[in-house]
Every structure is written in structure tokens, then in C-alpha cells.
Image: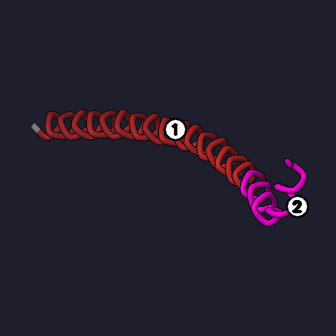
Amino acid sequence: MPDTFIKNNMSVVLSLLVAVFTAGGIFTEFTAIKSELTTVHDRLDKKIKVINDLEDRILDMEKQLEYERGFLEAATKKKKK
């Protein structure tokens, strides 16, 4: 009985096998994309951290520069008096 079912419905059985292998391939692709996305996200986080650190350093340099500029202006005004 099972042999006749398979013989009579060979296209259904093949369609089922194709569907199973296709689902496996799709799952594999989604897993690979998820892994790649995680890697890209981690790299982006590192780059954002570096950019934030550089911005902080630039702000500190600008503050120091303004302090020195103000100090020099005050010293110049003091000499003129």
C-alpha cells in the first residue's frame, strides 16, 4: 500500500523534499546574514566609541586653546597699562 501511494503521488513527494531542502537553505542564509549583521554592528559600535573619544579630546583641546588665548590677552592688556 505505501509503495503504491509513493508511485501514484511522486510529484507530491518530490515537492515535499524540495520544500524541505529549500527551507534549510533559506534558514542557512538567514543565519549567515544575522552573523554578518552582528559583526557589522560590533564594528560600528567600536567606531562610534572612537569618534566619541576623539570629539572629547577635541573639546578638551579647544578649551585649553581658549584658556591660553584668554591668558595671553589678559597678559597683553596688563602690559599696556
The picture quadrant where one finds residue 79 is: top left
Q: Residues within 10 Å of mark 2 (few under 14, many from 20)?
A: few
Mark 1 or mark 2: which is in front?
2
- Rounded to the nearest angstrom, the CA distance separating label 1 from label 2 is 57 Å
Residue named by callout 2: 7
Q: Which residues are magenta?
A: 1-20
Residue 76 within the segment the image draws in magenta: no
Q: Report whether 12 appears left or right of 48.
A: right
Residue type at numbered disc 1:
Asp
**Dot placed on the residue nearer the N-terminal end, 1 or 2:** 2
Residue type at numbered disc 2:
Lys
User: Looking at this rendering, what residue extends furthest in the front direction?
Assistant: 1
Q: Report whether 19 appears left or right of 55.
A: right
Q: Residues within 10 Å of mark 1 (few under 14, many from 20)?
A: few
Q: Which mark is residue 45?
A: 1
State whether residue 3 is above or below residue 74: below
Q: Position of residue 55 (x, y in %)?
A: 40, 40
User: Looking at this rendering, what residue extends furthest in the left direction?
Assistant: 81
Front residue of 64 and 23: 23
Q: Position of residue 77 (x, y in %)?
A: 14, 39
Q: Residue at x 72, y 47 (%)?
A: 28
Q: Residue at x 55, y 37 (%)?
A: 46
Q: Position of residue 58 (x, y in %)?
A: 40, 40
Q: Residue at x 39, y 35 (%)?
A: 56
State whether residue 21 is above or below residue 38: below
Front residue of 39 and 51: 39
Q: Residue at x 47, y 42 (%)?
A: 51
The picture quadrant where one finds residue 44 is: top right
State whether residue 29 is above or below residue 67: below
